[in-house]
Image (cartoon, coloured by chain):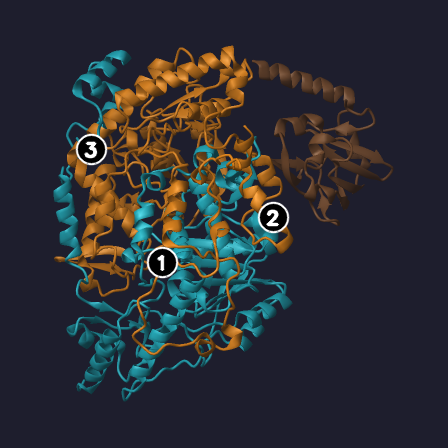
Chain colours: A cyan, B brown, C orange
Amino acid sequence: MRYLPKSESERRQMLATIGLQSPDELFVTIPEAYRLGAPLRLPGPLSEAEIIEYFRARARENSAGYTCFLGAGVYNHLRSVVTDALIQRGEFLTSYTPYQAEISQGTLQAIFEFQTLVCQLTGQEVANASMYDGSTALAEAVLMAQRLTGRRKFLLARTVHPEYRQVVATYARNLGLELRELPFAASGQLDLAAARDALEQDTAALVVQTPNFFGVLEQVAELAALAHVREALLIVCIAEAVSLGIVHPPAEADIVAMEGQSFGIAPSYGGPFLGVIATREKFVRHMPGRLAGQTTDNQGRRGFVLTLATREQHIRREKATSNICTNQALMALAATIHLCLLGKEGLRELALQNVAKARFARAELAKIPGVRMPFSGPVFNEFVVEFPRAVRLVNSELRQEKIIGPLPLGQFYPDQTKRGLLCVTESMPRTEIERLAQAVRHALEEPL
Amino acid sequence: MYPSEYRYTREHEWIKVEGSTATVGITDYAQHELGDIVYVELPKVGARLAASQPFGTVESVKAVSEVYAPVSGEVIAANDTLAQSPEIINKDPHGAGWLIRIQLANPAELSGLMDAAAYQAYLAEKSKEAAF
Amino acid sequence: MSRPAPARRHVSRDEGLIFEKSAPGKRAFQLPPLDVPAVEAAEALEPAYRRGEIEGFPEVSEIEVIRHFTRLSTWNYSIDLGMYPLGSCTMKYNPRVNEHVARLDGLATEHPYQPVELSQGCLRILKALEKCLLEITGMDAITLQPAAGAQGELTGLLLIRAYLESRGNPRRKVLIPDSAHGTNPATVVIAGYQVQNIKSDAQGQMDIEQLRSLVDEDVAALMVTNPNTLGIFESRIAEVAQILHAKGALLYMDGANMNALAGVARPGDFGVDVMHLNLHKTFSTPHGGGGPGAGPVAVKKILEPFLPVPVIEEKGDQLALHLNRPQSIGRVRAFCGNFGVLVRALAYTLAYGPGIRRATEDAVLNANYIRRRLEDVYELPYKLPCMHEVVFSDARQRKHGVNTMDIAKRLMDYGFHAYTTAFPLIVPGALMIEPTESESKEECDLFIAAMRAIAEEAAANPELVKTAPHTTRVGRLDEVAAARRPVLRWKPPAAENKEEALQLSTAGSQKNKKS
């Protein structure tokens, strides 16, 4: 087998060194009743070419040839080939967690740079080396807020991504945390009055997402003020990180839980992605996840190490800030490289291109009789459209044109079956936006 | 080495009684076992402590140790200098490295603690066990 | 003619931070021109929603990005370079075809919310992997959702809780052996249970009599690793399962050590009710400096109704994602799992097919070979036969003041990464060594020679070992300072401090100038 570097004669020699005759003798400590007598029934073995063909065949069974206008937490942005060229280097791809700092300085310095970039983007003081994804980062932020305040009640805007809220619920259920949802206003933003009324003396935190699930920007500064009056924390989660190129960073938030997939990571049917938590320096010892810190060696040279490890599971065990061990280091590296490639001006330009494309799409769709934009709040690259009939029906017409239309909101908000979420990034050609508008117009002209 | 006017616990805390109040810290043995101390978590002033219950933690790079209250009482002061310079505990564990001061709730609890001679004998026994 | 300045060590050894190379106006990436009307920043958003420039954000060219990260990469050890003898990490070869297929157009490009009729390829990949993993583990049902082993553990415990709740009482305690990985007790707490520790016996295996006395109707489960973290198979595992089942408790297995079992034995056969797998361990997906991974959870039939959503179901020849499962524990993450990692794991499994047993044999052979060739110079605290990993202690070297950390650091001077130090906790001064099947006899022999040399050095010249490493790019780093006064990000220097910052970033090359 091509992955195994031993010849038969070497195996025999090594067995002889141990005093054994056959490999089966290596397993005598397993009771005989459980030792398999026959090979497992598995497909293969396949050669490299056959493996590639298998996956190419699967790739042909997906959405090839379709234009996709979906966002909702997973964004199709342009990615430079430079990123893959670098992360595929064996020294990054096949290296271990940098516990032995002296021979992992590449990884550690890159993590330090990543942490810095996240702070610069979010306006927060410290950031960790990654969590699994935005949804679990949000769940961990909630647990962190519980530790910090000692309180158990949480208010979550309904405009937070529905699946993120579901994940928070799964984590919170067994820890006696109480989760309450808050309604949204006509603007598509969290209803400020509802938030003010719901905040109590024993609220741990208010949780919002910006841009929110409807693509609308939330009023972070106002919400922070409301929360802080009650000595509650404000947790802001961000699903579309490219927005930070133009949108005011949530510096007033106490904890930021971000999804970094937009920074150079392919959609890849939902993962692996890149969660990260950023917060104020005074909260750092309550923060989950690894942290890279700067230090010096015994010759005074600058170097980096994993630090504040006493928060983590391998030392604190049952008192750890989290059970997280493996994180998303390679994705964090991809994001770091991507952000360095974009640079200060490039990120801004990218964000403005997104705004421009979405604005154009919105304008084209607004011209169609019957189509309206129900939410008045400011948006970035996603927005909700309302059709005179169920979105699913419109989408099946669009599919005949090889267009994957807006995400029907009805599956998450049962009263909104005529509304869909549309995302337009810098990667969407104008001609496709025009084709979408034309197809929607035709679909709506069809009798039901 | 171990001040004769202090009392000691089996968990390596010391307590120096001054009338109805007392100062608490960890012993030289404890700081040596932990290694370079990097962080200390102390209770707030006003916190009520129960004897033998943990009231804080002392951390080195690779380990965290809980610190246990030798006796019951209310915290009247915490050593703020340790936030900036936790290494003071390593340098002067019985003096400047004190952790908290408390108002004693039940002075009778002191009788259960070891004096300096007993503590030193306890340490000697521990090192014999380790040698096995 | 003036004398030329002495040559500095090339900057590739002293590469600074990317922020230190920035200069205004440099760019590395050009966007295609906009084909719709442009929107200026001031028109894009109202002032309250708009940000100013990002201070200190990098501004570099493409070649600087390539050089910066290439240089950084050269400071890393990696599997591509040599062995990682890290116990319980299973650092095996990461096949490159896996990278290729994960990046295919039509796989890397797919959106998890696209219509299920347009995602059959992705779903078939997931279903195929599910079937392979069920065959390997001998379990009945599986979820591929969890993002890593620790999340798999949480999912497993939540499944146990849901099952017990459905029978009227979730119970309160979970038993954890004192040899367990730290994620186990941390996870128990997040699942809302209390940890109860159970000690190993003198042979390093589970103490069955102690277990019998501890298992009562308040115990929800026992979390076991098998083989355990000493590399020793828990030969009485079926009895363990019986004791638990008799009291209505369940057996959870941490599958981190599956590299000792794949193709040889199946946890489902010896009484395990629920287990997780670490795809970044046994199934070769790359560690990438710390992740991503994936932690699928396989279960017996009784736990199937509680699996997290979505669940992939077959409807004739079509596959669909099911969300409406009334007894499900809910979602453990958004979307559909770490699909890219799952693709790699399937590619690995397809490469081996039924021959996967051979990999397991080689892994166990390597570990035992190393054990035999080192047991005369390093203390072996537990003498039972080991499987894919072996645990020594530093007891003999400690007599000279040298401990396991020191030995690990000295090993780097011989060109290897360290083994796992100071774990499991039941062996003071542990050296936990797992060579995996990816190591040739030559590599094993080199490792053995290095370890034997260090044992001699510990006796003859302990200072050399205690101050190691000596040949790495940086020496031993001050972890105490890093923890006392953490510096966790770069900050733009204030004008007066620019000079100081420049000094700091070139300190290394200054040192070399002098020497």
Extreme-front residue of the structure: C1
The x and y percentages for residue B109 are 77, 34
Task: Report helix, strand or loop for mark 2.
Answer: helix
Res. C443 visible in picture: yes
Query: Which residue type does callout 1 highlight?
Result: Ala
The residue labelled by disc 3 is C356
Q: Name the residue rendered at 48%, 47% in the picture.
A: C17
Q: Chain of mark 3?
A: C
Name the front one of labels 2 and 3: 2
Could you classify mark 1 by the number of other residues whose Cα lies within 10 Å: few (under 14), some (14-19), or many (20 or more)?
many
Residue A277 coordinates in the image, percent (x, y): 49, 54
The residue indicated by pointer 2 is C499
Q: Residue at x 35, y 37 (%)?
A: C253
Q: Residue, x 33% and y 74% (percent of image)?
A: A357
Of the numbered discs in the image, which one, if any, rests on residue C334? 1
Q: Residues within 10 Å of mark 2 (few under 14, many from 20)?
A: few
Q: Is residue B59 left or right of residue A112?
A: right
On the picture, is A151 further left or further right than C109? right
Numbered-mark total = 3
x then y, percent, for residue C390: 37, 22
Say which element carries label 1.
loop
What distance separates the C-alpha of mark 1 from that of mark 2?
A: 47 Å
Q: Amino acid at mark 3?
A: Ile
